[in-house]
Amino acid sequence: MSDLIQTISVPVDPPYEALIGPGLLHSCGARIAQALGGACRAAVVTDSAVAPLYLSAVESSLADVGFSVCSHVFKAGEGSKNLVTLSALLEFLAEERLTRTDCVIALGGGVCGDMAGFAAGVYLRGIRCVQLPTTLLAAVDSSVGGKTAVDLRAGKNLAGVFLQPSAVLCDTRCLATLPPAALADGAAAAIKTGVLSGEELFGLWEHGDPLAQPEEMIARCVAHKAAVVAADPFDTGVRRTLNLGHTAGHAIETCSGYAVSHGHAVAAGLAIIARASARLGWSEAALPARIEAVLRRSDLPITSAFSARELAEAALADKKRTGGDITLVIPEAVGRCTLKKLPVTQLSAVFAAGLEG
Ligand code: GLY
């Protein structure tokens, strides 16, 4: 099976590797020891949905190669991604006397990666973190690149730190336990990456069955993200293209009171900005239909019931607005996306163009 394991280098400072393949959780101890240069005290951080499935396998694999393991489980769900959960996690790391040479291991989806990564980034002013993503969304996007955050009352992801992991191990067998809606959430992020990266990845979604043997598709997503993050680790330039579909997507999440999940909202946001870009003459005319067809194949939405005005108002309350302008990611063609700065007064018209039939 090891021939199915894909290795993607993430050339940041210091560089690290993302491994993608079946069964990696059961051999994670040796691989993590290799990435860290030896065993140490390891705090595994996971949630109440993931712990019954994978925690004991990870603890055993770590203990087998000499790690001294402690584990912290918090309640599953976006509702836990806050300063209260973070505070409990930091107190746990302190009670367990982790030192600067120890490490935090994030076992779970995006919320877990964010919580554990944030805690590792601020505990003792920063200790090492390894990401073990168990959802498709975390595998193709959030586990790589070092963004961590918690939600504040004022909005999502408003407090956080950048902390690049020391390694990412994505066990593709975990995808088998995901409900269809969670798989679709990950598909949305992967399709977005396909539009950004080019025909090879987008074509897997357009013509293939990328979830049948997901290693290649995940590796392509991670390779694209690795290149972008290496060019712009702190999200001040080209990394912002990874927010394709997010302006309308975040607005849909906000307007729905978070009843629409992030992946489903980004899917609709991607279709909306693709249609708007074609109508406004910024992109290839055929692009929206291709994107819509691919999203539909994954049972993802391609529009929203909220009005252009409602979406624009929600988007302009978002943290990405600076001054009187907003920067949108424009999909010009598969593999060609640009950043476009617009006066905020034009956003409602752009959304209106994207919501039209
Ligand atoms: N998920 C977008 C980023 O990491 O920049």
Image (spheres, rainbow, N blue to C red):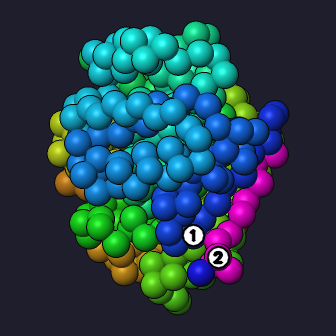
- x and y, in percent, of residue 252 in the image: 29, 44
| Front residue of 303 and 6 | 6
The magenta region covers 2-11
Left or right side of 257 for 249: right
Residue on which disc 1 sits? 21
- x and y, in percent, of residue 240 in the image: 63, 40
**Type of amino acid at the residue the image marks with label 1:** Gly
Q: CA distance from mark 1 to mark 2?
A: 8 Å
Q: Which image quadrant for residue 229? A: top right
- x and y, in percent, of residue 274 in the image: 50, 62
Please report the residue visible at 41 percent of the width from the left and 31 percent of the height from the top: 70
**Type of amino acid at the residue the image marks with label 2:** Ser
Residue 261, visible in the rendered structure: no
The N terminus, quarter of image: bottom right
Q: Which image quadrant for residue 40? A: top right
For discs 1 and 2, the disc positioned in front in the rendered view: 2
- The residue furthest bottom is 207
Please report the residue visible at 63 percent of the width from the left and 53 percent of the height from the top: 30
Residue on which disc 2 sits? 2
Label 1 CB sits under 8 Å from any ligand 1 atom: no
